[in-house]
Image (cartoon, rainbow, N blue to C red):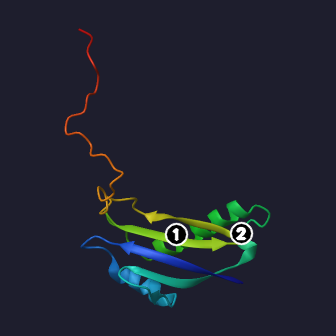
Amino acid sequence: MKSIQVFLNYDLSFNGDYEGLFKWLDDHNADDCGQNFCEFTYTINPSDVVQDEPKKAANQVAMMIDKDIMSTVKINKGDRIYIVSSYDNVMFSGFLAGGHGPKPWAWYSTRTQPTPKIKIINEVDG
């Protein structure tokens, strides 16, 4: 058996399945790392993973974690779960549920140009 360290961020909706997620995290002895962020050790049987293609192996491991979590947690519209880990020196990260949301830091940079309120879609020759 092989153990890997996994970092997980969760952002569940108001009626999200916190009970299911917290049960899964508790079953995996996850440690709290701040608001909606935790880490845990995940054990994998190396014989279940492609050994000669590291990127494919990392993807397989991510899918194993995904399948395991989703077997316990009911995902609702708007829920997000994101993981970061590595397997055999290949780092991987991604959303198991949901996707990127609006950036709270948008427009703070002085390099960013504001989007005009009116966009020219197509100029008409005239």
Q: Residue at x 46, y 71 (%)?
A: 70
Q: Position of residue 124 (x, y in %)?
A: 26, 15
Q: Position of residue 121 (x, y in %)?
A: 28, 27
Which corner quadrant of the image does residue 3 belong to? bottom right
Q: Which residue is drawn at 39% across and 59% down?
A: 100
Q: Which residue is drawn at 51% across and 91% down?
A: 29
Secondary structure type for disc 2: loop
Secondary structure type for disc 1: helix
Residues at marks 2 and 1, CA–CA distance in whole angstroms: 15 Å
Compared with 75, 107 (above or below) is above
Residue 49, numbered label:
2
Q: Is residue 4 visible?
A: yes
Q: Residues within 10 Å of mark 1 (few under 14, many from 20)?
A: some
Nearer the observer, 4 or 43 = 4
The amino acid at mark 2 is Val
Q: Is residue 71 visible?
A: no
Quadrant where the image shows the N terminus:
bottom right
Quadrant where the image shows the C terminus:
top left
Q: Residue at x 33, y 57 (%)?
A: 109
Q: Name the residue under label 1.
A: 66
